Amino acid sequence: MRIALVSIPVDDPIKAHRFYTEVFGFQSKQFVPEAQLAIVVSPEDPDGTALLLEPRGDSFAKEFQEKVYAAGLPIIVFGVTDVKTEVARLKDRGVRFRDDLARPDWGLENICEDSCGNLVMLKELEQT
């Protein structure tokens, strides 16, 4: 068994699709704006786990998203090979980061805002 699809709540799936493809650099797997359907994948693994940008509406998902955001918790973690380079690239594209780079025991990381109501952590992957 493997994870095929995960979802995160977003305030606007069309805006989120634009941000996740044009800013983060993911590829569109399925995009049907009139159905509010937006699914993206990593260009490094297009057949891997997909990310559904789920419209939150005014349901319980909105409250969940707002509470996670208010607590300063990331809704998802993306692995990168060089977090410093990735942070610089995203800052050049206007992405807002919460803090400076942190290096807890588990590695270099930083948290940014995705412009769709979520915090996203960038975590440097260990080189093996």
Image: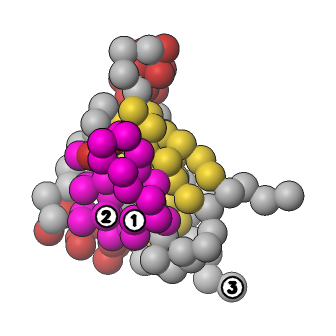
User: Considering only vertical position in the picture, is 55 above or below 28?
Assistant: above
At a point 32% along the width and 77% down the height, the residue shown is: 85
Per the model, the C-alpha gap separating discs 2 and 1 is 7 Å
Q: Which mark is residue 128?
A: 3
Q: Which residue lies furthest to the front in this view?
A: 34
N-term-proximal mark, 2 vs 1:
2
Q: Residues within 10 Å of mark 2 (few under 14, many from 20)?
A: some
Q: Circle 2 — which element?
A: helix
Q: Circle 1 — which element?
A: strand
Q: What residue type is labelled 2?
A: Thr
At a point 68% along the width and 57% down the height, the residue shown is: 4
N-term-proximal mark, 2 vs 3:
2
Residue 42 seen anywhere in this rendered image of the structure = yes
Residue 16 in picture, x, y percent from top left: 30, 47
**Nearer to me, 74 or 28:** 28
At a point 25% along the width and 56% down the height, the residue shown is: 18
Q: Mark 1 points at which residue?
A: 28
Q: Which mark is residue 21?
A: 2
Q: What residue type is labelled 3?
A: Thr
User: Considering only vertical position in the picture, is 43 above or below 113?
Assistant: below
Per the model, the C-alpha gap separating discs 1 and 3 is 29 Å
Residue 23 shown in magenta = yes
| Range of residues picked out in magenta | 15-41
N-term-proximal mark, 1 vs 3:
1
**Nearer to me, 38 or 11:** 38
Q: Could you tell me if the residues under marks 2 and 1 are in contact, i.e. CB atoms within 8 Å?
A: yes
**Nearer to me, 73 or 118:** 118
